[in-house]
Image (cartoon, grey):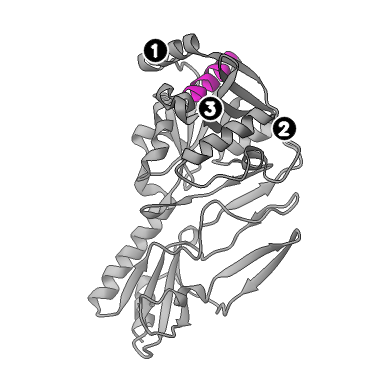
């Protein structure tokens, strides 16, 4: 499983449409996609969302919220620029935010760049002349995508973060857009679930089939990480029944820490971890301090096996997996590979052959 980031020098509206339709999303002045996120449950699958706008209408609760807030606040929708009031509000928002945010709003959305290659708009909400919420969204030819929403903690009762998303949708509808992309949800992490309330016509992207499916019928079991876990769990059961020491490692922090990667100018770069993030560690029958690390490569329907050593001779020894990680570290805009004792993996397409090898 890989996180992929592309740095952009420019992007046409139709290009943004194509990226969004394939489960990509803006990151700074680049665009990225990933399939995993860290949460309380460990590594969990990411599901990218989009809302179909054709025939879409706001429900009764949404209309009530929009009516009350339009009566209470002054609203401006305008081309996006950076200004000081945003940073002041961002600092207040960051102080109450459950998570990690950048040092400034500009750095949060633009990274280290001073320019913006996207066609961006802002929803600004004022209480008299005081900025109490704002959001950033990008426009494609047929789509709009929500990037960031910031609100004053003292105004939490007005649901201003959700409200700005509704205003973005309203703007997209009025300008003939067909799709609205709110980002992703992560099953098991409730803080993302508000995105599912923006409309009944919400869809999720299934990477294995490269198509969008109504979220209410979304086949979670068909997500790539879930398919990999299923294969490793089946192997785990068979090996355990044979009396082998075996442990599934679904919390492998060394290989994935969120949407990360390396920006390479005008070139796609895939940040290499293991073939897949979930691993099966099997004790060697011959050596107490040697183990086999088994990963499953879904696209080739095969298992990869690498033999590694452990100083402690325990399945709880996390260092046995760190020894075969390939790291790529940016150094002054150059990429530098550091490979730590990375033996060539053995490939097994037939489960019986794999089990026989592990029993040797």
Indicate left or right for 29 with 153 as reference. Answer: right
- State the SS at label 1: helix
The disc label shown at residue 180, or none: 3
Indicate left or right for 359 with 34 as reference. Answer: left
Q: Earlier in the sequence, mark 1 or mark 3?
A: 1
Q: Which of marks 3 and 2 is nearer the N terminus?
A: 2
Q: Callout 2: few (<14), some (14-19), or many (20+) C-alpha neighbours within 10 Å?
A: few
Residue 242: x, y in percent?
25, 78
Provide the residue span drawn in magenta. 163-174
On screen, 288 above or below 185?
below
In reply to whether residue 276 is colored magenta, the answer given is no
Gap in angstroms between the C-alphas marked 3 and 2: 17 Å
Q: Mark 2 points at which residue?
A: 12
Residue at x-position 46% and y-position 61%: 277
Q: Callout 3: few (<14), some (14-19), or many (20+) C-alpha neighbours within 10 Å?
A: many
State the predominant SS element of the stretch in magenta.
helix
> Is residue 177 among the parts visible in the rendering?
no
Which mark is in front, 2 or 1?
1
Indicate left or right for 81 with 49 as reference. Answer: right
């Amino acid at each position: 499983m890989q996180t992929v980031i592309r740095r952009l020098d420019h992007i046409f509206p139709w290009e943004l449409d194509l990226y969004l339709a394939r489960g990509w999303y803006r990151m700074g002045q680049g665009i990225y996609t990933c399939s995993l996120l860290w949460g309380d449950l460990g590594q969990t699958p990411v599901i990218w969302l989009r809302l179909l706008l054709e025939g879409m209408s706001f429900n009764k609760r949404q209309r009530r919220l929009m009516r009350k807030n339009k009566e209470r606040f002054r609203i401006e929708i305008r081309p996006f620029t950076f200004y000081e009031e945003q940073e002041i509000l961002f600092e207040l928002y960051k102080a109450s935010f459950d998570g990690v945010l950048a040092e400034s709003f500009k750095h949060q959305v633009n990274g280290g760049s001073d320019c913006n290659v996207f066609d961006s708009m802002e929803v600004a909400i004022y209480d008299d002349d005081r900025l109490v919420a704002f959001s950033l969204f990008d426009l494609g030819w047929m789509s709009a995508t929500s990037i960031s929403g910031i609100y004053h903690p003292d105004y939490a009762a007005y649901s201003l973060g959700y409200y700005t998303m509704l205003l973005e949708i309203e703007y997209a509808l009025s300008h003939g857009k067909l799709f609205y992309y709110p980002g992703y949800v992560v099953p098991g992490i409730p803080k993302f679930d508000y995105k599912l309330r923006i409309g009944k016509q919400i869809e999720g992207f299934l990477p294995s089939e490269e198509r969008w499916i109504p979220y209410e019928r979304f086949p979670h079991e068909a997500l790539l990480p879930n398919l990999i876990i299923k294969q490793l769990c089946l192997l785990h059961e068979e090996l355990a029944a044979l009396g082998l020491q075996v442990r599934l490692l679904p919390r492998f922090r060394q290989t994935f820490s969120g949407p990360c990667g390396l920006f390479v100018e005008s070139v796609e770069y895939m940040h290499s971890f293991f073939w897949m993030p979930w691993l099966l560690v099997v004790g060697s029958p011959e050596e107490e301090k040697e183990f086999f690390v088994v990963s499953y490569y879904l696209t080739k329907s095969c298992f990869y096996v690498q033999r590694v050593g452990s100083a402690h001779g325990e399945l709880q020894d996390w260092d046995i997996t760190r020894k075969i990680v390939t790291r790529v570290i940016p150094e002054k805009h150059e990429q530098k590979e550091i490979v730590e004792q990375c033996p060539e993996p053995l490939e097994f397409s037939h489960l019986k052959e794999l089990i026989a090898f592990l029993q040797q």
